[in-house]
Amino acid sequence: MNRKDFIKKGCNFCLLGTATILFPNLMGCSPSYTVFSTEKKNNELHLPLTLFEKNPLQIVRVKGLNFDIAVHKKDNDFIALLLQCTHAENEVLPDQNGYSCSLHGSRFNSNGNVIKGPAELSLKKYKTTISNNHLIIRI
Ligand code: FES
């Protein structure tokens, strides 16, 4: 390999590394989800079930709540989790296996259970029911 080829290959690796850092979604590292904004009424959130036809994972942004709620439809079950790390209250984000915290590296499965510390407690889970084509989350 001559000097010109060496420099050309080195630049290609640098570009790939930069793209991985800047655009992780393009590299297949992040799950697909949509963000739904709403307000709570009588300590309940009402989400149209049609939301989950497009995407089984919804991130619910609630006015007045400091952290989002992830709602994942699995078969006919819904799992609603507060995206607040139980270690030191940092935000957790969806990843390919569930949720992860960037502050100290805790990871949680899609049910909110700890799969890697330092967090020791599961993510906070909310009760859900279905009524009139809406998912009701009690917060
Ligand atoms: S705050 Fe999440 S791992 Fe420490």
Image: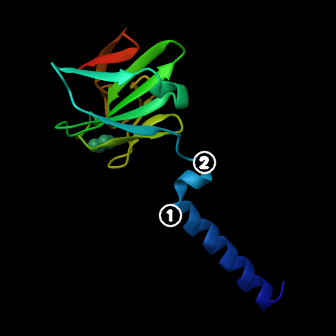
Q: How is the image coloured?
A: rainbow
Q: Which residue is mark 2?
A: 28
The span from disc 1 to disc 2 (Cα, nearest Å) is 13 Å
- Residue neighbourhood size for the residue with mark 2, other residues' Cα within 10 Å, grouped as few (<14), some (14–19), many (≥20): few
- Which quarter holds ligand 1? top left
What is the x, y in percent for residue 117? 37, 36
Regarding mark 1 in the picture, which secondary structure is present there? Answer: helix
| Farthest bottom residue in view | 3
Regarding mark 2 in the picture, which secondary structure is present there? Answer: loop
Asked whether 48 or 27 is in front, the reply is 48
What is the x, y in percent for residue 92? 35, 41
| Farthest front residue in view | 132
Apparent side of residue 39 relative to residue 113 in the rendered image (left or right): left
- Assign the N terminus to one quadrant of the image: bottom right
Q: Quadrant of residue 90?
A: top left
Above or below residue 103? Residue 67 is: above
Residue 110 appears in the figure: no
Above or below residue 43? Residue 91 is: below
Q: Residue at x 50, y 12 (%)?
A: 76
User: What count of labels does the image hold?
Assistant: 2
The three-letter amino acid code for the residue at tag 2 is: Gly
Q: Which residue is mark 1?
A: 22
Disc 2, ligand 1: is the CB inside 8 Å? no
Q: Quadrant of residue 48?
A: top left
Apparent side of residue 52 relative to residue 81 in the rendered image (left or right): right
The three-letter amino acid code for the residue at tag 1 is: Leu
Q: Residue at x 60, y 48 (%)?
A: 28
What is the x, y in percent for residue 128? 33, 14
